[in-house]
Amino acid sequence: MKVQVLGTGCAKCKKTEEHARQAIAELGLDADLVKVTDLNDILEFNVMMTPALAVDGEVKVSGRVPSVAVIKGFLTQ
C-alpha cells in the first residue's frame, strides 16, 4: 500500500503527514508513506487545494486535514 501526502510543506501538510503516520502505525500496516512536495507532481493528481491524501494513487481528501480516524477508514476500505 502506498500512502501519499500531497503538499508543499505547510503546517497543515505536516499535520496530515503526522496523522497518516499515526493511522498506519495504529493499524499495523505495511505501507509506504511518501510526501509529494513538487507542485507539478501534486497537479498531476488534479488537486487544487492542499493538503491532500492519496491511497494507492487515488485522492481521498483534499483541502483539509483528515483526522486519524478518517485516515484509518481510507486505509481499511
Image (cartoon, rainbow, N blue to C red):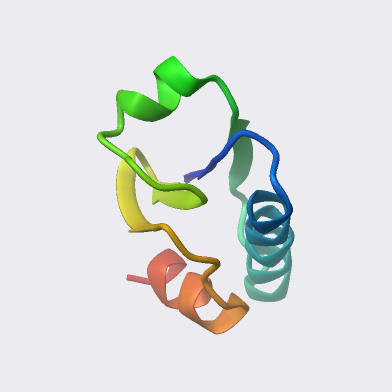
Q: In which quarter of the view is residue 5 placed?
A: top right
Residue 51 position, x and y percent, is 52, 51
Q: Which residue appears farthest toward the bottom when viewing the image?
A: 69
Horizontally, is 48 left or right of 28 in the view? left
Tell which of 32 and 46 is nearer to you: 46
Q: Is residue 34 above or below residue 30?
A: above
Q: Position of residue 62 (x, y in %)?
A: 39, 56
For residue 27, which quarter of the picture?
bottom right
Which of the 4 quarters of the picture holds residue 41?
top left
Q: Which residue is painted at 62% across and 35% down in the image?
A: 35
Q: Residue at x 34, y 26 (%)?
A: 43
Spot occupied by residue 23 in the image (x, y as percentages of width and height): 64, 70
Image coords of residue 4 (percent x, y) = 51, 41
Residue nearest the viewer, comparing 57 with 1: 57
Taking depth in this image into account, of 39 and 3 the one nearest to the observer is 39
Q: Nearer the viewer, residue 59 or 42?
A: 42
54 with respect to 12 (left or right) = left
